[in-house]
Amino acid sequence: MDISNKLIKRKSARYTISFAIIMVAAFVLDNFLFGPRIKGMLGNYVYPTIMWLLVILFMRLLPGASPGLSTRLRKLINSLAVVCVFIGILGAMIQGMMDGFGKSPFDHSLLGMTVNVISVGTFVAAIELTRSWLMQRHFKHRPAMGVTLIGLLYSAFSIPMAKLMNLEGLKNILEFAGSTALPEISASVLTSYLALAGGFWPAFIYHGGSSLFEYLSPVLPNVGVVSSTLIGTVTPILTLILVQQIFTEEKGYNKARREENHLGWAVGSVTAIVLIWFCMGVFSFVPRVIVSGSMVPTIDIGDIIVVKKMPGEMVEYGDIIMFQLGSMKVAHRIVSVKEEEGRRVFTTQGDAYDSPDADPVTEKAVIGKVVVVIPKAGWITMALRGWIS
C-alpha cells in the first residue's frame, strides 16, 4: 500500500471517529438533557433544533458519499420512498380500524404546526444526512450488515429512552417492546435500506413523510399492543422486501418493461392514496364494520357499511342512519319523525327488533346515511379484534 492510500485511510478513520463523537454527544443531549432536565420551549424545541442544525453543518465539512445512481434510478428510489410513506399511512389506518382513532396529542394551531415542522424537519434532515453518510461510506459493499446494524443503532434516536429506563415489570417491558421498540426498529431498517440504495433523499422522504403524518394528522390510531406489534413491525419489513426487489430488478429491465412497471406503481400508489383518503372520510364516505346483529337480515354481523356523511336535516323516514349514542356509533332505521322546538327528532329501530329504540335521535347526533352494504367484508377485521381481545 502506497503512502497516499495510507493517508486517505488515516483521514477516513479521523472522519469516522469525529462523526461517532458528534453522534454520541447528540444522542446524550437529546435524550438526557433536552426535555428531561431543560424543559419548556427551550428544552423541547429551541436547543434540540440548534443542536441538529450544528450536526447538519458538521456533515457539510465531511467528504461526500454518494450512491452514484443514474437519473432514472434516482427518480425510481425517490418514488419508491413516497410509496413507502403511503403504505405506512395505510397500515396506520388499518390499525385505527382495528383499535379505533383518538385525537392527536400534538398542537394543531398554526404556530404549533410551524414549530413542529421546523423542529422535526431539522431532526430528520440531520439524522438522514448522517445515516446516508455512514451507509455509503462504510457499508456500500456490506449491505446486509449495514442495513441491520445501522437500522438498530438509529432506532435509538426515535425510541423514547426516558420512558424505556423507567419501565418496571416484565409486562410493561414487553408491551413497550411490542408497541414502540419493534415498530421503530423495523422502520429504521427500511430507512437504512433507502439510504443505502439512494442516499439522503429517499431516506429523508420516507422518514420525513411518516413524521409529518404523525405530527400533522388531527387523529391518530389508538395504540393496541398486539396490533402495533403486528402492523407496525410487519408493514415496514414487507415494504422493504418489496422495494428491494423492485429496485434490484429495475436495474436490468429494458425500456418497455420499465415503463410498464412505472405505470403499475403509479396506479398502485394512486389506489393506495384513494383508499387511505376513503378510510379517513375525505370523500364524505366512511366505512364501518358491523359487529352486532340488530339490523339482521338487512345488515348482518361482519358486513361493512359505507356511510355518506350528511347533516340530520337531510335524512328521511325509512333511511338507515348512523348516529352517535354515548361513546358508540349505531346504525338503525328511522321509523318515525317528529318536530320538537323547530327541529326534527327521529325514532330509530333495528330491523331485528320488535320495538323501537328507547332514546330518540336528534338531528345533531346524526353522522350520516348508510348507502352501501358489503356482505362479509369485515370478517378479517373482526377476527383480528377477537384475537387482540
Image (cartoon, helix red, strand yellow):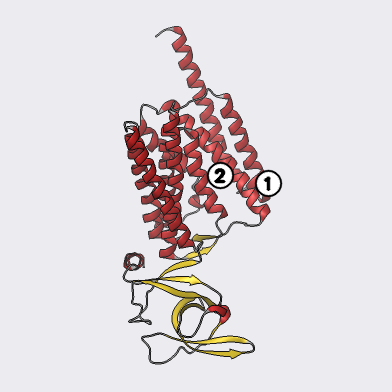
Residue 306, image x and y in percent?
42, 70
Residue at point 38% right, 88% down? 353
Asked where in the image residue 18 lies, by quadrant, the reply is top right
Query: Label 1 to label 2, Cα distance in Å?
Result: 14 Å
Q: Quadrant of residue 62?
A: top right
Q: Secondary structure at mark 1?
A: helix
Residue 239 placement, left or right of 35: left
- Report crowding for label 1: few under 14, some 14 to 19, many 20 or more residues within 10 A (C-alpha): few
Residue 31: image tag = 2
Q: Residue furthest bottom?
A: 355
Left or right for 4, reference 104:
left
Q: Are marks 1 and 2 in contact (CB under 8 Å)?
A: no
Relative depth, front residue between 38 and 166:
38
Select label 1 or label 2 by which is in front.
Answer: 1
> Vertically, is 193 above or below 289?
above
Q: Tell me what residue is drawn at x 45 percent, y 84 percent.
A: 318
Q: Position of residue 27 (x, y in %)?
A: 54, 39
Between residue 52 and residue 322, name the one nearer to us: 322
| Residue 51 occupies quadrant | top right
Residue type highlighted by circle 2: Asn
Q: Amino acid at mark 1?
A: Leu
The quarter of the picture where the C terminus appears is bottom left
Report the front residue among 71 and 166.
71
| Secondary structure of residue under mark 2 | helix
The label shown at residue 42 is 1
